[in-house]
Image: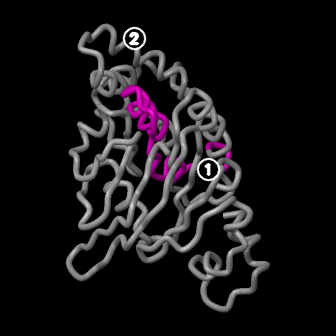
Amino acid sequence: MMLTLDHIAKRFGGVQAVSDVTFAVARGEIVALIGPNGAGKTTLFSLIAGFLAPDAGAIRFEDRDVTGLPPHRIAALGLVRTFQTAQPFERLTVAQNIAVGAHLHLASRGAALRRGAEIAERVGLGKWLHRPSRELTVAGRKRLELGRALATEPHLVLLDEVMAGLNPTEIDAIVPTIFAIRDSGITVLLTEHVMRAVMRLSDRVLVLNNGRLIAQGKPADVATDPAVIEAYLGRGVAPPAARELARG
């Protein structure tokens, strides 16, 4: 397995944000981590990427224990994340922003900029290459965030709500980009509220609720799981409501 979490837990004061979470992601998969607001998804991403240290449990990436390692060391090993709220360097161009990520492995400024131009094309920002990032739309900023992560040459990328704030047309446009990332050899673990995209993209779905993993499996199976329907739509909702869950 490329990524393995073993009984991971994290508490903030009186709140158990993540509790006894165990799962694995295989090389070449697109796996979605879903759950209602406050389920612990972003906290779990921060634990995997090194922005937080777990209180208990272990995280292994490509057969190496990365539990508690700082983000820059984990990124250098090939595991990076994006952030739900994109915060580019607004005075820098798109190419320069992406080059920042490329500098993780490339010392030369020229090489980093060439890498930035290549990645910009891959994420659909080729026409914006020399424009200031402050001019990007929300959808453009999401693609830039993705580009900066890809510039680090990851083996596995964690996508934190890369479709949040996008309209249906923009969502449909970014889905092929995510498939292309997987097809290039990069494994993808994503958290997302746009269920239509989750059902289309994912090989497997993991469902988190109140910090606990309550279900996992094929997208169609998870969408009809009574525990998942209850977590999203409330107790006593009939199974046909799974159609609403799947549509998003």
Label at residue 216: none
Is residue 53 depicted above or below 109 in this figure?
below
**Colour scheme of the rendered structure:** one colour
In the image, taking residue 161 as reference, residue 180 lies left or right, namely right
Distance from the alpha carbon under mark 2 to that under mark 1 = 31 Å
Find the residue positioned furthest to the right: 240
Measured from the top left, where is residue 195 in percent x and y?
A: 64, 60
The residue at 33%/48% (across/down) is 49
User: Over which residues does the magenta segment extend?
Assistant: 141-170
Between 36 and 185, the one nearer to me in the picture: 185
Q: Which residue is mark 2?
A: 114
Is residue 226 depicted above or below 60 in this figure?
below
The residue at 62%/43% (across/down) is 170
Residue 133 in which image quadrant: top left
Badge 1 amino acid? Asn
In the image, taking residue 172 as reference, residue 107 lies left or right, namely left
Q: Secondary structure at mark 1?
A: loop
Q: Is residue 147 magenta?
A: yes
The residue at 55%/67% (across/down) is 207
Between 219 and 192, the one nearer to me in the picture: 219
Q: Secondary structure at mark 2?
A: helix
Point out the tag, 2 or 1, that comes first from the N-terminus. Answer: 2
Measured from the top left, where is residue 196 in percent x and y?
A: 68, 56
- Count of number-bearing discs: 2
Is residue 118 depicted above or below 231 in this figure?
above
Badge 2 amino acid? Arg
Label at residue 167: 1
Residue 53 in which image quadrant: bottom left
Q: Is residue 98 magenta?
A: no
Location of the C terminus by quadrant is: bottom right
